[in-house]
Image (cartoon, rainbow, N blue to C red):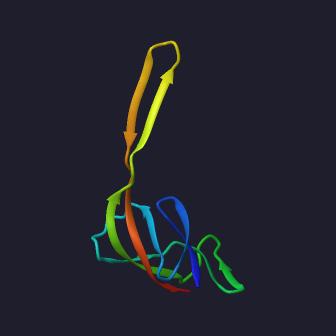
Amino acid sequence: MYAVIKTGGKQYRVSTGEKIKVEQIPADVGAEITLDQILAVGEGESVRIGTPLVEGASVKATVLAQGRHEKVKIFKMRRRKHYQRHQGHRQNFTELRIDAIAA
């Protein structure tokens, strides 16, 4: 069984036992959270698609870690103008393990 969930402005296709990294969710490590924005639920040939959300569906997940991604380096330059600008960014993430999908 799989589900398409929406969290942090992005959509993820998840199944039971899978580990995913999503945008940061304010929860403690080891806490169990419920994701209720389910866009689609499927098993084999049957698929339920929500309009926009599937009624009564939810996904239970456990928070494994809170962390930060690798640094993305931003470099801007104008040739022959002696202009260079360096900048970096590290995005926060929450690592989840999908425990159960309830349709």
Q: Is residue 6 above or below residue 72?
A: below
Q: Is residue 31 above or below residue 103?
A: above
Residue depicted at 39% across the width and 34% down the height: 87
Q: Residue furthest top?
A: 81
Residue 7 lies, in percent from the top left, at 48, 65
Q: Name the quarter where the C terminus is drawn.
A: bottom right
Q: Is residue 79 above or below residue 88?
A: above
The total number of labels drawn is: 0
Residue 2 lies, in percent from the top left, at 58, 80
Q: Name the quarter where the N terminus is drawn.
A: bottom right
Question: In the picture, residue 84 is in which quadrant?
Answer: top left
Nearer to the camera, 18 or 46:
18
Residue depicted at 39% across the width and 68% down the height: 95
Q: Is residue 42 left or right of residue 72?
A: right
Residue 88 lies, in percent from the top left, at 38, 39
Residue 64 lies, in percent from the top left, at 34, 72
Nearer to the camera, 55 or 18:
18
Residue depicted at 47% across the width and 28% down the height: 76
Question: In the picture, residue 13 is in which quadrant?
Answer: bottom right
Residue depicted at 40% across the width and 72% down the height: 96
